[in-house]
Amino acid sequence: MAFIRPWYNVWSQEMEGKAEFAKAEQNRKIKIEEARANLEAEKLNAQAEIERAKGAAEAIRIENGSITPTYIQYLWVRQQSDLSDKTVIYVPTEANLPILESTRGLSLPKE
């Protein structure tokens, strides 16, 4: 029995090492696949951004290259849906249109 115990300890440690190595190899493969999936998602996001830019360029071309203040206000109102977690205060004007650039004329204090 005394002869088998040291041999068993060596064999057991070898098996534990192989199991840890296999687990590390599997974790490495998982990380590689996650990185590939992230890369693919970023490529698709970039393609979507390019298509959005093409659409915006086409819209400007259709409008003959002139963007009217009314169209800018329309875009501003449309993007308000992205600000659901923020508070927007509307200041009434004589035309009932929002003031988009209320701070343009203000000068910053000099330090």
Image (cartoon, rainbow, N blue to C red):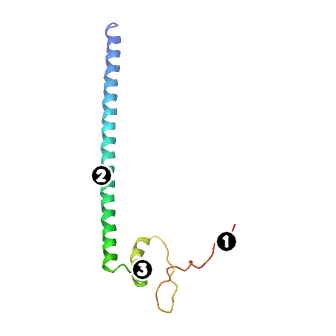
Residue 64 spot, x, y in % from top left = 33, 80
| Residue type for callout 2 | Glu
Q: Nearer the viewer, mark 1 or mark 2?
A: 1
| Residue type for callout 1 | Pro
Q: Which residue is mark 1?
A: 109
Q: Which numbered dot is residue 68?
A: none
Q: Which residue is mark 2?
A: 40
Q: Would you identify the image quadrant in which residue 53 lies?
A: bottom left
Disc 1 element:
loop
Q: Would you identify the image quadrant in which residue 67 lies?
A: bottom left
Q: Which residue is mark 3?
A: 72
Residue 15 spot, x, y in % from top left = 31, 22
Q: Nearer the viewer, residue 59 or 43?
A: 59
Q: Residues within 10 Å of mark 2 (few under 14, many from 20)?
A: few
* Distance between the alpha carbons at the discs numbered 1 and 2: 47 Å
**Vertical placement of 39 versus 31: above or below?**
below
Q: In the shown orientation, is residue 58 left or right of residue 97?
A: left
Of pointers 3 and 2, the one earlier in the residue sequence: 2
* Distance between the alpha carbons at the discs numbered 3 and 2: 34 Å
| Residue type for callout 3 | Ile
Q: Nearer the viewer, mark 3 or mark 2?
A: 3
Of pointers 3 and 1, the one earlier in the residue sequence: 3
Q: In the shown orientation, is residue 41 left or right of residue 84?
A: left
Q: Quadrant of the N terminus?
A: top left
Residue at image position (42%, 80%) is 72
Q: Residues within 10 Å of mark 3 (few under 14, many from 20)?
A: few
